[in-house]
Image: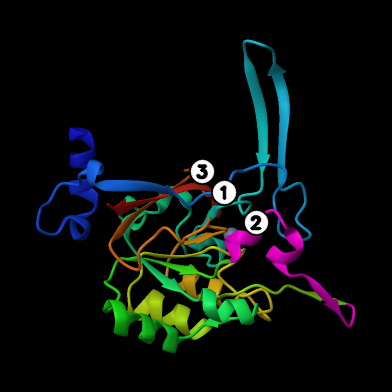
Amino acid sequence: MSRWRVAAAWCCAPLLAGAQPLDLARHRLVDLTHEVSERGPAWPGSRTPFKLDTLTATATTAMFRLQLNEHFGTHLDAPRHASGAGWTNEQIPLDRLVVPVVVIDVTRQAATDRDYALTPADVAAHEAQHGRIPRGSAVLLRTGWARFWGDDTRYFGAATAGGRTVLHFPSFGVEAARLLATDRGAALLGVDAPSTDIGAAPSFAVHAILGAANVPALENLADLSALPATGATLLALPIKTTGGSGGPVRVVALVPR
Ligand SMILES: [Zn+2]
């Protein structure tokens, strides 16, 4: 416990404003990570996104060899994913990954429009109800898409028209992403859907904004319904590969009881 306090005091000053040590007994731990397995779902067209070879598996010992696309399952996009100058995995400071979390809920909009893209008006409506998003927050977008995990057809919404396949799932809109990443100074963005750009987006414009602003992102988050709009703390700790553009991440929220 004392070790945790030292680390927390060093990395997360805004989190501990008022110098209250983090009391884990007063928090629920909520896992926001999907299981990583061959069941995927993998981004359409990705090659060998997941492979677990058995090196040995007996009644008493086991060891496997894991081959994984960085951008598979619940994962972090390092800013380098969309910017030549952005941080790679090992360069992202811990104070970007252990942060207060704000949840913006667009499940109602996305339920009737699977191409729904978060707007600045949605951010304004959220702030009118819950207060201005503090600098250094993780801003997670709840679309409700986690309920389709395991059903690739609904999760990605792939549809072919005119010989061209377009995906259909909700996420951030370009202007809202710019507002959050630059004006609000978000530590990171995250979404319970396959990408920070909507499936039908003509380009990865949100990715480009986040890369240019050096803001990491979380994709394929699990169900966010247990999180309050404000007041929880996020721990999103990715694999620390040297030079990585992203990778698997265990995401946990500490929700006040
Ligand atoms: Zn990614």
Please tell me whether mark 2 or mark 3 is closer to you in this view.
Answer: 2
Q: Which residues are magenta?
A: 145-163
Q: Residue at x 45, y 73 (%)?
A: 105
Quarter of the image where ligand 1 sits = bottom right
Q: Earlier in the sequence, mark 1 or mark 3?
A: 1
Magenta highlight on residue 162? yes
Give the colour scheme shown: rainbow
**Residue 192 location, x and y as percent?**
54, 63
Q: Amino acid at mark 1?
A: His
Distance between mark 1 and mark 3 Cα atoms: 20 Å
Determine whether the residue tagged by mark 1 lies in a helix, strand or loop.
loop
Quick one: label 2, few (<14), some, or many (20+) residues within 10 Å? many
Q: Residue 34, which numbered label?
A: 1
User: In the picture shown, does residue 121 fall above or below 209?
Assistant: below
Quick one: label 3, few (<14), some, or many (20+) residues within 10 Å? some
Q: Earlier in the sequence, mark 2 or mark 1?
A: 1
Return the residue at label 2: 149
Which residue appears farthest toward the left when viewing the image? 18
User: In the picture shown, does residue 51 fall above or below 186?
Assistant: above
173 or 146: nearer the viewer: 146
Q: Residue at x 40, y 74 (%)?
A: 181
- Please tell me in which quadrant of the rendered image residue 198 appears: bottom right
Which residue appears farthest toward the right when viewing the image? 163
Return the residue at label 3: 241
Magenta highlight on residue 101? no
Q: Residue at x 67, y 11 (%)?
A: 59
Q: Residue at x 32, y 53 (%)?
A: 255
- 237 vs 221, left or right, is left
Q: Residue 206, which numbered label?
A: none
Distance between mark 2 and mark 3 Cα atoms: 27 Å
Q: Earlier in the sequence, mark 2 or mark 3?
A: 2
Q: Looking at the rendering, in which quadrant would you find the N terminus?
A: top left
